[in-house]
Image: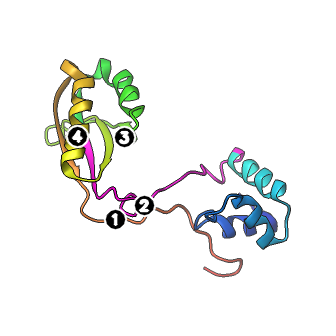
Protein backbone atom coordinates (compact mmCIF):
# COMPACT_ATOMS: atom_id res chain seq x y z
CA UNK A 1 0.00 0.00 0.00
CA UNK A 2 1.34 3.35 -0.90
CA UNK A 3 0.17 6.74 0.23
CA UNK A 4 0.75 9.95 -1.60
CA UNK A 5 2.11 12.88 0.37
CA UNK A 6 -1.30 14.47 0.92
CA UNK A 7 -2.89 11.22 2.10
CA UNK A 8 -0.04 10.74 4.52
CA UNK A 9 -0.41 14.28 5.87
CA UNK A 10 -4.18 13.78 6.35
CA UNK A 11 -3.62 10.52 8.24
CA UNK A 12 -0.94 12.12 10.39
CA UNK A 13 -3.28 15.01 11.15
CA UNK A 14 -6.25 12.81 12.06
CA UNK A 15 -4.80 9.62 13.55
CA UNK A 16 -5.00 10.95 17.12
CA UNK A 17 -8.61 11.98 16.54
CA UNK A 18 -10.59 14.65 14.79
CA UNK A 19 -10.77 18.05 16.46
CA UNK A 20 -13.74 18.64 18.77
CA UNK A 21 -15.27 21.21 16.50
CA UNK A 22 -18.55 21.80 14.69
CA UNK A 23 -16.55 21.44 11.45
CA UNK A 24 -13.71 19.01 12.19
CA UNK A 25 -12.81 18.33 8.56
CA UNK A 26 -12.64 22.05 7.81
CA UNK A 27 -10.31 22.49 10.76
CA UNK A 28 -8.05 19.67 9.58
CA UNK A 29 -8.11 21.09 6.06
CA UNK A 30 -7.16 24.55 7.30
CA UNK A 31 -4.21 23.12 9.19
CA UNK A 32 -3.00 21.35 6.05
CA UNK A 33 -3.72 24.13 3.58
CA UNK A 34 -6.40 22.07 1.83
CA UNK A 35 -10.11 22.45 1.13
CA UNK A 36 -12.56 20.72 3.47
CA UNK A 37 -14.05 18.76 0.54
CA UNK A 38 -10.63 17.38 -0.39
CA UNK A 39 -10.06 16.08 3.16
CA UNK A 40 -13.51 14.43 3.20
CA UNK A 41 -13.07 12.93 -0.27
CA UNK A 42 -9.57 11.67 0.43
CA UNK A 43 -10.62 10.05 3.72
CA UNK A 44 -13.53 8.39 1.92
CA UNK A 45 -11.14 7.10 -0.76
CA UNK A 46 -8.78 5.81 1.94
CA UNK A 47 -11.71 3.95 3.49
CA UNK A 48 -12.71 2.51 0.12
CA UNK A 49 -9.14 1.25 -0.36
CA UNK A 50 -9.10 -0.25 3.13
CA UNK A 51 -6.30 2.02 4.34
CA UNK A 52 -8.66 3.58 6.89
CA UNK A 53 -11.01 0.98 8.28
CA UNK A 54 -13.48 3.26 9.97
CA UNK A 55 -14.02 6.72 11.35
CA UNK A 56 -15.95 6.65 14.59
CA UNK A 57 -16.34 7.96 18.07
CA UNK A 58 -14.44 6.45 20.99
CA UNK A 59 -16.02 8.21 23.97
CA UNK A 60 -14.33 8.33 27.34
CA UNK A 61 -17.23 6.98 29.37
CA UNK A 62 -15.58 7.94 32.66
CA UNK A 63 -15.41 11.59 31.54
CA UNK A 64 -19.13 11.37 30.77
CA UNK A 65 -19.87 10.15 34.29
CA UNK A 66 -20.35 6.53 33.29
CA UNK A 67 -18.02 5.05 35.91
CA UNK A 68 -19.58 1.59 36.21
CA UNK A 69 -18.85 -0.20 32.97
CA UNK A 70 -19.13 -3.90 32.47
CA UNK A 71 -18.76 -6.41 29.71
CA UNK A 72 -21.73 -8.68 30.12
CA UNK A 73 -21.21 -12.18 28.78
CA UNK A 74 -23.95 -14.59 27.83
CA UNK A 75 -24.21 -18.25 26.94
CA UNK A 76 -26.93 -18.12 24.31
CA UNK A 77 -28.22 -21.11 22.37
CA UNK A 78 -26.45 -21.04 19.01
CA UNK A 79 -29.57 -21.08 16.76
CA UNK A 80 -30.86 -17.92 18.48
CA UNK A 81 -27.57 -16.14 19.18
CA UNK A 82 -27.31 -14.09 15.99
CA UNK A 83 -30.86 -12.75 16.03
CA UNK A 84 -30.90 -12.09 19.77
CA UNK A 85 -27.42 -10.56 19.60
CA UNK A 86 -28.69 -8.05 17.04
CA UNK A 87 -31.53 -7.12 19.39
CA UNK A 88 -29.13 -6.69 22.31
CA UNK A 89 -26.84 -4.59 20.12
CA UNK A 90 -29.74 -2.27 19.34
CA UNK A 91 -30.37 -1.45 23.00
CA UNK A 92 -29.49 2.19 23.63
CA UNK A 93 -27.34 1.38 26.65
CA UNK A 94 -25.17 -1.22 24.88
CA UNK A 95 -22.16 0.43 23.23
CA UNK A 96 -20.96 -2.67 21.42
CA UNK A 97 -22.13 -6.23 21.12
CA UNK A 98 -20.65 -9.18 19.31
CA UNK A 99 -20.56 -12.96 19.05
CA UNK A 100 -17.41 -14.98 19.74
CA UNK A 101 -16.75 -18.70 19.80
CA UNK A 102 -16.91 -20.36 23.19
CA UNK A 103 -13.67 -21.62 24.75
CA UNK A 104 -15.00 -24.71 26.46
CA UNK A 105 -14.85 -25.98 29.10
CA UNK A 106 -13.59 -22.82 30.85
CA UNK A 107 -15.54 -20.19 28.91
CA UNK A 108 -19.14 -21.04 27.90
CA UNK A 109 -20.08 -17.51 26.74
CA UNK A 110 -20.67 -16.65 23.10
CA UNK A 111 -22.40 -13.24 23.27
CA UNK A 112 -20.70 -10.12 24.63
CA UNK A 113 -22.44 -6.80 25.33
CA UNK A 114 -20.75 -3.75 26.88
CA UNK A 115 -23.00 -1.92 29.30
CA UNK A 116 -22.28 1.50 30.81
CA UNK A 117 -23.82 3.19 33.82
CA UNK A 118 -23.27 5.70 36.60
CA UNK A 119 -23.37 2.95 39.23
CA UNK A 120 -23.14 -0.82 39.36
CA UNK A 121 -26.80 -0.88 40.40
CA UNK A 122 -27.71 0.88 37.16
CA UNK A 123 -25.58 -1.55 35.15
CA UNK A 124 -27.17 -4.53 36.92
CA UNK A 125 -30.63 -3.17 36.09
CA UNK A 126 -29.61 -2.94 32.44
CA UNK A 127 -28.11 -6.41 32.61
CA UNK A 128 -31.49 -7.62 33.87
CA UNK A 129 -33.14 -6.06 30.82
CA UNK A 130 -30.77 -7.99 28.57
CA UNK A 131 -31.51 -11.19 30.48
CA UNK A 132 -35.24 -10.62 29.99
CA UNK A 133 -34.70 -10.05 26.27
CA UNK A 134 -32.65 -13.24 25.91
CA UNK A 135 -35.17 -15.27 27.91
CA UNK A 136 -34.91 -19.04 27.91
CA UNK A 137 -32.31 -18.98 25.10
CA UNK A 138 -29.75 -17.84 27.68
CA UNK A 139 -28.29 -20.59 29.81
CA UNK A 140 -25.98 -18.49 32.01
CA UNK A 141 -24.29 -15.11 32.19
CA UNK A 142 -21.74 -13.06 34.04
CA UNK A 143 -20.32 -9.56 33.95
CA UNK A 144 -16.75 -8.34 34.01
CA UNK A 145 -16.52 -4.82 35.41
CA UNK A 146 -13.87 -2.43 34.14
CA UNK A 147 -11.34 -1.39 36.73
CA UNK A 148 -9.34 1.07 34.63
CA UNK A 149 -9.38 2.88 31.33
CA UNK A 150 -7.48 1.22 28.54
CA UNK A 151 -6.30 3.52 25.83
CA UNK A 152 -8.28 3.07 22.64
CA UNK A 153 -6.26 3.82 19.57
CA UNK A 154 -5.84 2.72 16.03
CA UNK A 155 -2.84 2.48 13.78
CA UNK A 156 -0.29 5.23 14.15
CA UNK A 157 2.10 6.11 11.38
CA UNK A 158 5.25 8.07 12.02
CA UNK A 159 6.18 11.21 10.22
CA UNK A 160 7.81 10.57 6.85
CA UNK A 161 11.36 9.44 7.45
CA UNK A 162 10.81 8.73 11.16
CA UNK A 163 10.03 5.42 12.83
User: Which residue occupies 70% across, 81% down?
Assistant: 161
Alpha carbons under labels 4 and 2: distance apart: 30 Å
Which quadrant of the figure contains the N terminus?
A: bottom right
Q: Is residue 126 above or below residue 15?
A: above
Alpha carbons under labels 2 and 1: distance apart: 8 Å
Q: How is the image coloured?
A: rainbow
- Would you name the residue on which mark 3 appears? 93
- Would you name the residue on which mark 1 appears? 149
Q: Tell me how many marks there are.
A: 4
Residue 140 spot, x, y in % from top left: 15, 31
Q: Secondary structure at mark 1?
A: loop
> In the rendered structure, which disc, 2 or 1, sits on the residue that comes first in sequence?
2
Alpha carbons under labels 3 and 4: distance apart: 27 Å
> In the rendered structure, which disc, 3 or 2, sits on the residue that comes first in sequence?
2
Bin the neighbour count of mark 4 within 10 Å (Cα to Cα): few under 14, some 14-19, many 20 and up. few
User: Which residue occupies 68% across, 69% down?
Assistant: 13
Residue 103: mark? 4
Quarter location, residue 147:
bottom left
Alpha carbons under labels 1 and 4: distance apart: 26 Å
Tell me which secondary structure the magenta stretch mostly adopts: loop
Alpha carbons under labels 3 and 2: distance apart: 15 Å
Q: Secondary structure at mark 4?
A: loop
> In the rendered structure, which disc, 3 or 4, sits on the residue that comes first in sequence?
3
Q: Is residue 32 above or below residue 139?
A: below
Q: Nearer the viewer, mark 1 or mark 4?
A: 1
> In the rendered structure, which disc, 4 or 2, sits on the residue that comes first in sequence?
2
Dot 2 and dot 1 residues touching (CB under 8 Å): yes
In the image, the segment drawn in magenta is: 48-72
In the image, taking residue 78 as reference, residue 53 lies left or right, namely: right
In the image, taking residue 37 as reference, residue 50 lies left or right, namely: left
In the image, taking residue 163 as reference, residue 61 lies left or right, namely: left
Q: Secondary structure at mark 3?
A: loop
Amino acid sequence: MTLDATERRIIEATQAGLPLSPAPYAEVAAGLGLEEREVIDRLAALQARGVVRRIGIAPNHYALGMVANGMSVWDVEDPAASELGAEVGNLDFVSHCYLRPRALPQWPYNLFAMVHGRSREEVEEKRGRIAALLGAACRQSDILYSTRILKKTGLRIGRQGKA
